[in-house]
Image (cartoon, helix red, strand yellow):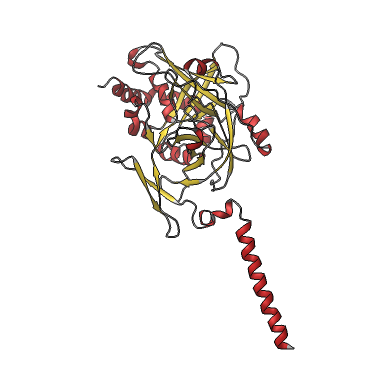
Amino acid sequence: MKKYIAQIAIYSLILLSFYLVSTNLTSPTVISQTPQQETTTPVEQKIQATTTSNTVTLANTTPKTTQKQLIKTKYITPTSVQDAQKVLVTTPEPTTSFESINENARKAVINILCTTDSSGPLTPITGSGVIISKDGVVLTNAHIAQYFLLKDFNNQKDFVKCVIRTGNPAYPTYKAELVYISTKWIAEHKNDITLPNPQGTGEYDYAFLRITGKIDGSAMPQELPFVAINTEDTVNVGTNAILISYPAGFLGGQTIIQSLYQSSAVIRVSDRYTFGENTVDLISLGSSIVAQKGSSGGAVIDEKGKLLGIISTSSDGDTTQSRNLRAITSEYINRSLMEGTDVNISSLVKSSAPYATTFNTDVAPTLTKALSDVILKK
């Protein structure tokens, strides 16, 4: 009798084992497909910048992770308003869970349009940004905001005019001034301003603007729509997010001026990288309708409606579905800002007006000269 019971127990264990294996093989989730990315280390790769190659080597931070390579990708803004092709851009509907977040965040995502007073070495450009405070502080990319440094290029007053546009279609609404741009980014990329397709990893590619008034001279609203910035949470692979921007890569110049609309896309974070060690600085967002020139500076919004980061670069591809967007994280921007200024984003936002005055008086002239010398080939 005891022998018979033991045989039954053994058969039961065998059947249970087959059931468990079958369950694991047939019902995985997206997040469970990459368990090491979630459990072994907060960041899987380390970006080591080089000056002699267009590739960046990713070294492992732990023995358990897999070595990868990150290719320097093109900045997806600025896009030339004059040379872009004309194609209709549609706005896909977000999933139900993101509908209210999308509706609110779209009010805070703005278009930045910079035009020149006359023909010359600079071409008109368009990009995106996101308002992060009720009094109008805007977060965008350094490769967009550098045009604010060229306002009076070559001693020609108001040669470059940059305006903040809102709505659908985008309409000139606000004037703005530069509050801060990463001086390290200018130092490393000043020569790129004359290139048709500059490349980079996204490191230091951030800047802050401040809305100073309405273009039509009317009174400013007491509060502007904004997206609160999330500098606390580490972004994980599998995180759901919504992208919002003003893509213009397939539009002609006249369409960009008259009929530029926002686009939204719900995505899932597919990878993450670091510019240092054990920090999430850059995230991969996969392909979407947003993967176009003009989307740089666009918002990456989390499921709580907060800003996880801003779009910075995109890989090459003939269509939006063959490209891979990447964004620098809010956590990285906050940390990098503190390393360079001893001021965090919260403090910068609270004192944006006096900080802008100091920056534009003491720092900006040197940066303007650096860019101008490249353009004028001095």
The image quarter containing residue 93 is top right
The image shows residue 26, relative to residue 356, as above or below, that is: below
State the residue in front, 80 or 18.
18
Q: Residue at x 59, y 12 (%)?
A: 218
| Residue 304 image position (x, y, % from top left) | 63, 40
Q: Residue furthest left?
A: 378
Q: Residue at x 38, y 25 (%)?
A: 364
| Residue 232 image position (x, y, % from top left) | 55, 44
Quarter of the picture containing the N terminus is bottom right
Quarter of the picture containing the C terminus is top left
Q: Residue at x 31, y 25 (%)?
A: 370
State the residue in front, 268 or 103.
268
Q: Residue at x 54, y 56 (%)?
A: 35
Report the number of numbered marks: 0
The image quarter containing residue 183 is top left
State the residue in front, 273 or 25.
25
| Residue 67 image position (x, y, % from top left) | 41, 53
| Residue 292 image position (x, y, % from top left) | 49, 30
